[in-house]
Image: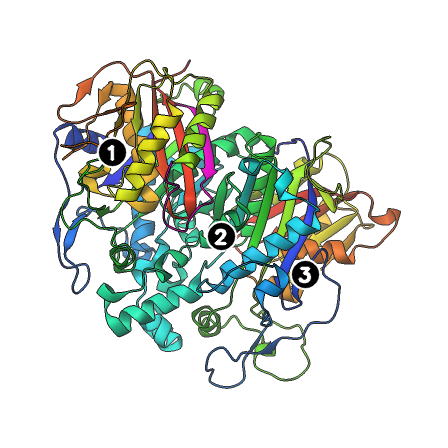
């Protein structure tokens, strides 16, 4: 049972990534992992890291002192997406604007800090300002507070498909009349405890250890960053944005198992995707089950855009970046005018698929 | 709603919760051993049956609470777990796997992970793991999602599950919340001076704060058409739901309760009911000075024009604030109240907040027909969720 519901349109994009804070699509340029310096490592370690920047230089008036970096980036990415959509929030009923945030680890840096303060001073002497900032929902709350957005405010997570799940939940809010605009935000900050877990579990790519130019290999390179999309109902006369459409989202489905090809076939309803954006989490598209599923879902003429290494390094929250990179790299012209499939698979037979149309 | 599963300080099952609350038993008791230096009142789940060893080593206490409540809900539905193979899961938690880790993971993570079971215990840290635990344990492979929106989490999981049914993403969804007691959250609430050392007194003018409890609740949701078609026992009908945000402060609610009042209004609009149709509100009612006064203001605003004061109680006075589980447990209590026509009073409410539009329930349990009942939840970061339950198909 795959529902076909009224489509919704992506009208704005913002991000904070190793490319820095950006509004709109991310220019395609080579990206090298950089050396970790935020904590002491036993030898050279690399990851795709967000370079330091002053938030107030990007979003005037924003106050980010004592916030987790994840909260800061969510606030900046959302603000850039709203700006990119051309939305003047003073002209919008802000009780009708929803925020849907996806994260795997939440505010893990301040969680580490809270633990360390408890170890140093005792559990009876912990910091009352830090504690609420450790909540996984804190980034979404800050977006709502800064922009006075009083619609639904939701923080979701899924082992592999947090970003896709957030997009589907946000689309549902619009379709069911629970919001007029949805800001979708997804991402994570890389903390010492997370990186170390990947390393001890043997999941890291050799490229994390070497200074050599990056070569794609087994394992993955951990990443950090946050992407944001503005979503509005399609085809309405009273849209709040400048009217730009990056893509329309027709339907979406994700599951922890089952017959993925059959489900996606139902979703496509006989149409054939001209473009498939692989959001394979963890393994390069070419060797992951995503490639097989893509072949089953499309004919030979479909263009397949492989997952970007940076977006793969975000554990389950990379879907928005996969989509942004896919839109940035889509071929121009009629060859990509058919349906677009954002497609991901997980090692345990789970999958996520979003069916989009390009304008 | 075709199934309700509960793990509470009263034990496992809605029946035990109902019997305990109707008898007026309070589960809050003095606690000292949750961390060195802590003295206060909490409500603990003391009878959590052990899972198989290979499972318990991978599941946090949060996961185990979720699995137990889901098991109870499935049993309560009269189906075996195979009936839920394609179902969706929407589970809420704020604590996740914080119960399994300690400061050592921040001091020297590599050494911590090399301890026996370290990697496995840490793998349960993301709050998404509670949804995975329920899915894996029962072989459920439909859409699976976890949510975390502070203390509104459990209620919001039910609202989002209802959205999934509307979407057609699943025919049946298991939704709920789970959270255990742990030093991290207890210390956090203590640092905020939000805890009453004695059993709390929600909505009392002399209230001093909240107490933390632990538990879980899982509800089985399906469309009324689907439930009717398979002759399921319909326990209640979710008639309306809404979600809003105060957009005001990281921890404090809006003083006038504007966000919650809007949420109540939106839920009644969805249910197509008037202010006079709601017979009872199971309040968020934490017992903190700020929450309870804001909440009273919200009820005054939202139920303005009603012919008689709206009956309101806080059942946190019985077993504390179960954080991410609270909204789901209170949904279960609201369903129980609606089905049995019982208005459960707030304990220790001797001098209620002055609020002429509210009938603060206290003293004896009242019995009256309750066709429609509401459950209200709020949380840090300004999230609000309101659910309206009817006692059966209409």
Quarter location, residue A34: bottom right
The residue identified by callout 1 is B314
Looking at the image, residue B237 lies above or below residue A59: above
Q: Position of residue A28 (x, y in %)?
A: 75, 65
Q: Chain of mark 3?
A: A
Q: Specify whether residue A26 is in view.
A: yes
Which residue is pictured at 37% across the width and 24% down the height?
B389
Upstream in sequence: badge 3 or badge 2: 3
B253 falls in the magenta region: yes
Q: Is residue B319 above or below residue B270?
A: below
x and y percentages locating residue B210 in the rendered image = 23, 45
Does the magenta portion include B141? no
Q: Residue at x 48, y 44 (%)?
A: A154
Pointers 3 and 2 in contact (C-beta within 8 Å): no
Rounded to the nearest whole Å, what is the CA distance between mark 2 and mark 1? 29 Å
C-alpha span from label 3 to label 2: 19 Å
State whether discs 3 and 1 lie on one chain. no
What residue occupies the far bottom of the structure in this picture?
A43
Q: Secondary structure at mark 1?
A: loop
Q: Secondary structure at mark 2?
A: helix
Q: Is residue B233 left or right of residue A301?
A: left
Q: Looking at the image, which is closer to me, B346 or B291?
A: B291
Residue for badge 2: A142
Tags 2 and 1 on a common chain: no
Q: Which element is circle 3 on?
A: strand
Identify the disc placed on residue A22: 3
Q: Residues within 10 Å of mark 2 (few under 14, many from 20)?
A: many
Residue A122: x and y, percent?
23, 69
Given the image, what chain letter belongs to the residue carrying mark 1?
B
Residue A101 tag number: none
Q: Quadrant of residue B280?
A: top left
């Amino acid at each position: 049972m795959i529902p076909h519901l009224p489509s919704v349109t992506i009208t704005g994009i913002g991000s904070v990534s190793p490319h820095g804070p950006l509004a709109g699509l991310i220019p395609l340029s080579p990206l090298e992992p950089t050396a970790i310096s935020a904590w002491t490592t036993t030898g050279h370690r690399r990851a795709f890291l967000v370079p330091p920047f002053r938030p107030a230089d990007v979003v005037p008036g924003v106050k980010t002192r004592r916030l987790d970096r994840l909260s800061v980036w969510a606030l900046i990415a959302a603000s850039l997406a709203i700006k990119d959509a051309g939305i003047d929030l003073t002209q919008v009923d802000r009780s009708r604007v929803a925020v849907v945030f996806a994260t795997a680890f939440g505010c893990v840096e301040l969680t580490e800090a809270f633990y360390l303060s408890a170890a140093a001073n005792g559990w009876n002497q912990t910091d009352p300002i830090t504690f609420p900032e450790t909540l996984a929902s804190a980034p979404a709350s800050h977006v709502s507070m800064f922009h006075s957005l009083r619609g639904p405010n939701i923080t979701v997570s899924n082992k592999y498909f947090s970003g896709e799940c957030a997009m589907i939940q946000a689309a549902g809010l619009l379709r069911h009349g629970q919001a007029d605009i949805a800001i979708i935000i997804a991402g994570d900050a890389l903390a010492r405890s997370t990186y170390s877990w990947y390393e001890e579990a043997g999941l890291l790519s050799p490229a994390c250890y070497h200074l050599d130019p990056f070569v794609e290999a087994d394992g993955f390179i951990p990443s950090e960053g946050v992407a944001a999309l503005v979503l509005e109902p399609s085809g309405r006369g009273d849209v709040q944005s400048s009217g730009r459409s990056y893509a329309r989202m027709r339907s979406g489905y994700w599951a922890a198992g089952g017959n993925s090809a059959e489900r996606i076939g139902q979703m496509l309803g006989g149409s054939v995707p001209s473009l498939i954006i692989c959001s394979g989490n963890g393994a390069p598209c070419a060797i992951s089950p995503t490639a097989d599923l893509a072949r089953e879902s499309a004919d030979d003429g479909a263009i397949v855009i492989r997952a970007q290494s940076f977006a793969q390094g975000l554990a389950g929250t990379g879907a928005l970046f996969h989509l942004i990179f896919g839109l940035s790299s889509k071929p121009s012209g009629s060859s990509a005018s058919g349906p677009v499939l954002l497609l991901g698979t997980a090692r345990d037979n789970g999958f996520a698929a979003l069916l989009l149309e390009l304008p | 709603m075709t199934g309700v599963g509960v793990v509470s300080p009263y034990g496992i099952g809605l029946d035990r919760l109902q019997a305990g609350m109707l008898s007026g038993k309070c589960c809050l008791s003095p606690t000292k051993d949750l961390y060195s230096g802590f003295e206060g009142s909490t409500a603990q789940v003391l009878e959590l049956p052990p899972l198989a060893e290979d499972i318990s080593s991978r599941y946090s206490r949060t996961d185990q609470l979720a699995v137990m409540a889901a098991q109870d809900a499935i049993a309560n539905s009269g189906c075996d777990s195979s009936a839920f193979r394609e179902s969706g899961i929407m589970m809420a938690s704020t604590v996740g796997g914080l119960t399994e880790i300690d400061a050592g993971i921040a001091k020297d993570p590599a050494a911590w992970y090399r301890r026996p079971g370290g990697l496995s215990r840490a793998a349960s840290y993301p709050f998404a793991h509670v949804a995975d635990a329920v899915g894996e344990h029962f072989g459920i492979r439909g859409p699976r999602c976890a949510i975390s929106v502070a203390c509104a989490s459990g209620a919001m999981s039910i609202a989002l599950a209802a959205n999934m049914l509307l979407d057609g993403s699943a025919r049946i969804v298991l939704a709920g919340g789970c959270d255990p007691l742990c030093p991290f959250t207890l210390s956090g609430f203590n640092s905020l001076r939000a805890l009453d050392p004695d059993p709390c007194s929600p909505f009392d003018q002399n209230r001093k704060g909240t107490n933390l409890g632990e538990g879980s609740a899982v509800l089985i949701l399906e469309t009324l058409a689907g439930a009717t078609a398979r002759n399921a026992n319909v326990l209640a009908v979710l008639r309306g739901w809404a979600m809003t945000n105060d957009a005001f402060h990281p921890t404090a609610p809006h003083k006038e309760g504007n966000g919650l009042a809007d949420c109540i209004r939106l839920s009644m609009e969805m249910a197509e009911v008037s202010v006079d149709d709601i017979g009872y509100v199971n309040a968020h009612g934490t017992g903190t000075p700020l929450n309870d006064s804001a909440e009273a203001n919200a009820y005054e605003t939202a139920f303005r024009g009603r012919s008689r004061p709206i009956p309101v109680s806080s059942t946190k006075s019985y077993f504390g604030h179960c954080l991410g589980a609270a909204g789901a447990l209170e949904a279960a209590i609201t369903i129980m109240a609606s089905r049995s026509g019982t208005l459960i009073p707030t304990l220790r409410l001797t001098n209620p907040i002055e609020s002429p539009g509210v009938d603060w329930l206290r003293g004896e349990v009242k019995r009256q027909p309750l066709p429609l009942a509401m459950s209200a939840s709020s949380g840090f970061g300004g999230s609000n969720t309101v659910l309206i339950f009817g006692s059966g198909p209409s």
